[in-house]
Amino acid sequence: MFEQQFIVFKEVADTKNITLAAKRLHMSQPSISLQIQNLESQYNTRFFNRTNKGVSLTKAGEVFYSHVCEILDILDRAQHQVCELDEDRRGEIHLGATLTIGEYVLPNILAYLSAKLPDVDFKVKIANTEVIDQDVIEGKIHIGLIEGPEPKDRGVIVDKFWEDELVVVVPYFHPWASYDSIQLSELPYERFVTREVGSGTRKTMETVLAERGLDLTKLNIAMELGSTQAIKQVVCAGLGITIISALTVRRECDQGILKALRIQDDPVYRPLNILTLAKSSQTKYERTFINFLHNHKLLKEILTQNYCSKGMRYLDTTRAACDK
């Protein structure tokens, strides 16, 4: 019972808003208020100052908050350690991933690891960076995989595991398809297709082009689309060119449908990052997953080959590398 009260207390303190805390904990607002009142009654003090704009911690609340964080952290570690002792229990890894990673990176990784770790279930959520970051903070997922701008929350550890190259992509019949690279200064002369404003890929592209002196207002943006798959289909049809992740067009390039051109002189990369909660411990399965992501040689093999079609033969040739 006290654990639930501590969770409610911490959520209200973090959000500074009872309504928002209730929404995040999937509880009613009266239930949240009642638990806070019971907690204050139990300790015979007030933990929160209440105003029309929200709540804030009193001095007693600030002292209590630090102890609550420590207690919840200890309980979290205890739960992980007890679960690891239960040999008959299946392991679980709760993951979150942004769209590009979830659609083009994670499937090959899970295909490999599902064969290697048959006793582990992967629970995966695909969402934007903001949602994944918040879910890591709230403990709804234990590992987040994101591209694009890094979260600013100090309680979240950001750890790069891959550098994703952004490339100019054209259809196979485009005049540039005979090139291997292109200069950014040539882009304004073509119809341009891009992700919608606010997407991680769009933000990275805008930042990179601006840093390299290309005026974004001079781009002839013909379409803004909400998914990478839609962009690829439009480019295949010859309705424009785009800048997207090299990982997302590998298959189409191998099939001769699209051509990826590197940016001359100054190739564009963006980090793919692992998000974990600073004060949370990982289970042995989560540590295995994170260590795997840092095995760059093996990860490159899996991401650049059609692992799903190679089956167990590929697994056998790479098993030793993953165990290192």
Image (cartoon, grey):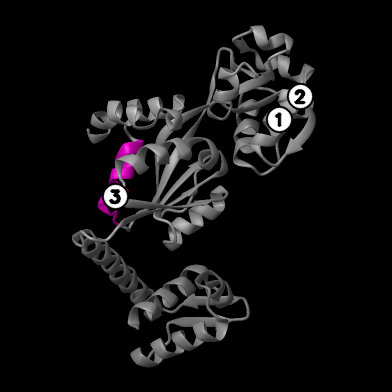
Q: Are marks 2 and 1 in contact (CB under 8 Å)?
A: yes
Question: Dot 3 lies on which element?
Answer: helix
Quadrant location, the N terminus: bottom left
Question: Dot 2 lies on which element?
Answer: loop
Mark linked to residue 233: 1
Mark linked to residue 143: none
Q: Is residue 199 visible?
A: yes
Residue type at numbered disc 1:
Gln
Q: Is residue 15 left or right of residue 207?
A: left
Kindly identify which residue carries mark 3.
285
Q: Write down the quadrant of residue 207 in the picture.
A: top right
Q: Which residues are magenta?
A: 281-293
Label 2 and label 3: CA atoms lie apart by 44 Å
Residue type at numbered disc 3:
Tyr
Q: Position of residue 155 (x, y in %)?
A: 40, 56
Q: Position of residue 115 (x, y in %)?
A: 34, 40
